[in-house]
Image (cartoon, helix red, strand yellow):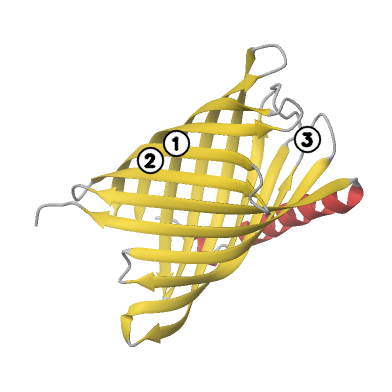
Amino acid sequence: MFKFAKNSKLKRILFLLLLLVYGNCFAQKTVQDQRTWFAYIGQWKVSEKWGFHVEGQLRYENHFDQNLQNVFRIGGIYFIKPNEHVTVGYGLIHTYSASADEFFTENRLWEQYQINNKWSKNTMTHRLRLEQRWIEQLADNSTAYQNRFRYMNRNLFHIADLKSDKNQIYAVLQDEVFLTIGENKVNSKFMDQNRFLVGLGLNHNNKLRLELGYMNQYVTSSYGNDAMNHTVSVTLFHNLDLQKH
């Protein structure tokens, strides 16, 4: 349907977006910090065409002194093809505010399209996601609304088999850009944030993947300095087949 991997024009656009993000880092004052993220991402398939998305994330300050954010997502998946699907879901996010010394709540709807392209033993994933965000404002007990678009490019490069091809070691190279759509009170900047990740993973029979990586998260702000978070990322991916065979 789409041949992203062979589209040189798309590659040039993505490269320019990365230059824009990191060009902004050096063009203005950026506060840097360290983080540790833990995530479980499950895809539970119940039939040939339908499945569920189940996700939980815990995000901490580097020394685990403070829980900074908790993310929970659920969704319904429709498989267009085995390697291509769309998802519609809901997210509940609690984020710590240092200035208020308490957590605020975000309710989020999200819709996404994802396609996986395999070449040899490697995989390239393209994911496009739209988000509708309702974010609690602690200062005046109101709610701010934002529309956001996200594009993720994710690459898995096979390194070696362990005893059999059911257990593999692979490398991860991933980048995701977040773009603000329209006017809002959350972040008036068009480039909301960017997440670049590099790491290693262990794949067990394409059912379980454990990944350890470094993520460079660059976050823009309308109200203060931008932030660059150097993040240790630990993620468990779980593909569960609940079909009756």
Q: CA distance from mark 2 to mark 1?
A: 6 Å
| Quarter of the rendering containing residue 77 | top left
- The residues bearing labels 3 and 2 have C-alpha atoms spaced at a distance of 29 Å
Residue 206 seen by the camera: yes
Residue 207: x %, y % from top left: 31, 64
Look at 38% across and 37% down and name the residue there.
74
Q: Nearer the viewer, mark 1 or mark 3?
A: 3
| Residue 28 placement (x, y as % from top left) | 90, 45
As helix, strand or loop, the secondary structure at mark 1 comes to: strand
Q: Amino acid at mark 3?
A: Ser
Question: Which kind of residue does numbered mark 1 sit on?
Answer: Glu
- As drawn, 188 above or below 124: above
Q: Which residue is mark 1?
A: 111
> Answer yes or no: do the residues labelled 2 and 1 have beta carbons within 8 Å?
yes
How many residues crowd around disc 1 within 10 Å: few (fewer than 14), some, or many (20 or more)?
some
The kind of residue on which mark 2 rests is Thr
Foreground residue among 142 and 108: 142
Question: Measured along the vertical axis of the image, is residue 120 above or below residue 155?
Answer: below
Residue 133: in sight, yes or no?
A: no
Q: Residues within 10 Å of mark 2 (few under 14, many from 20)?
A: many
The residue identified by callout 2 is 87
Residue 173 higher or lower than 23, as above or below? below
Residue 35 screen position, x and y as percent: 67, 52
Toward the viewer: 115 or 175? 175
On screen, residue 181 versus residue 219, left or right, reads: left
Give above or below for 97 relative to 20.
above
What mark, if any, has residue 221 been given in the picture? 3
Query: Residue at point 69% right, 22% down?
Result: 184
Name which residue lies at 51% across and 41% down: 129
Seen from the viewer's position, the closer of residues 162 and 87 is 162
How many C-alpha atoms fall within 10 Å of the one at disc 3: few (<14), some, or many (≥20)?
Answer: some
